[in-house]
Image (cartoon, grey):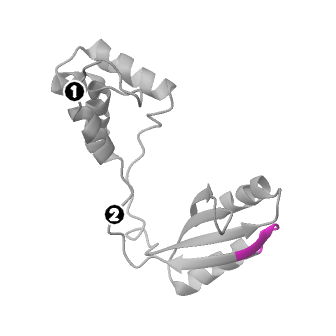
Amino acid sequence: MAPNAEGLDSLDARLLLLLSDEPRLGVLECSRRLGVARGTVQARMDRLVQRGILLGFPPELDLAAMGYGLTAFAVLEIAQGRRGLVAEQLAAIDEVCEVHATTGQGDLFVRMVARSNADLQRVIDEIVAVPGVRRTSTSIALSTPVAPRVRPLLERLAAADDRP
């Protein structure tokens, strides 16, 4: 099966969908369900890991069920030349889940979680105390109508014609 412009073919996509649905499946069971040889599945998985597409098999966790029912996003304006240092300090704050360097009004986009509004204030205070953070603007997420996902992209690739 020829890879498409993204570098994945339909077998890669079907394998990733299968592993997304059931990350604990072994190589042999994957090969049985996909109708290909065990060695093919192992080679595909190795290649996907080597290329940095398949990053691992972490469990999916419900942060609200763990006591972190509040999700917020902050746009940070930082001093020029401080992005790396600020990101390093943000990574040390346990409630900071993601940090993205962005274009536009702010410099960094931060996703964080907290147990309550008071806890969120504590987290924001920690973020504001990071040397190099000049200004923050925080929004609380009320709901998540579309959760983080890659499934639609994989489904499109899995269904794609493998014509050259």
Q: Amino acid at mark 2?
A: Val
Q: What residue did someone put label 2 on?
A: 146
Please say whether residue 94 is visible from this viewpoint: no
Q: Which mark is residue 22?
A: none
Indicate the secondary structure of the residue bearing disc 2.
loop
Q: Which mark is residue 161?
A: 1
In the image, taking residue 99 as reference, residue 55 lies left or right, namely left
- Seen in the picture, residue 56 relative to 28 is either above or below; the reply is below
Measured from the top left, where is residue 26 in percent x and y? 29, 28
- Seen in the picture, residue 30 relative to 67 is either above or below; the reply is above
The quadrant where residue 89 appears? bottom right
Measured from the top left, where is residue 44 in percent x and y? 36, 21
Residue in the image at 81% along x and 65% along y: 79
Between discs 1 and 2, the one toward the N terminus = 2
Q: Magenta includes 134?
A: yes
Measured from the top left, where is residue 152 in percent x and y? 29, 47
Residue in the image at 81% along x and 66% along y: 132
Image quadrant in which the C terminus is located: top left
Q: Which residues are magenta?
A: 129-135
In-front residue for pair 96/101: 101
In-front residue for pair 91/5: 5
Residue occupying the far bottom of the picture:
118
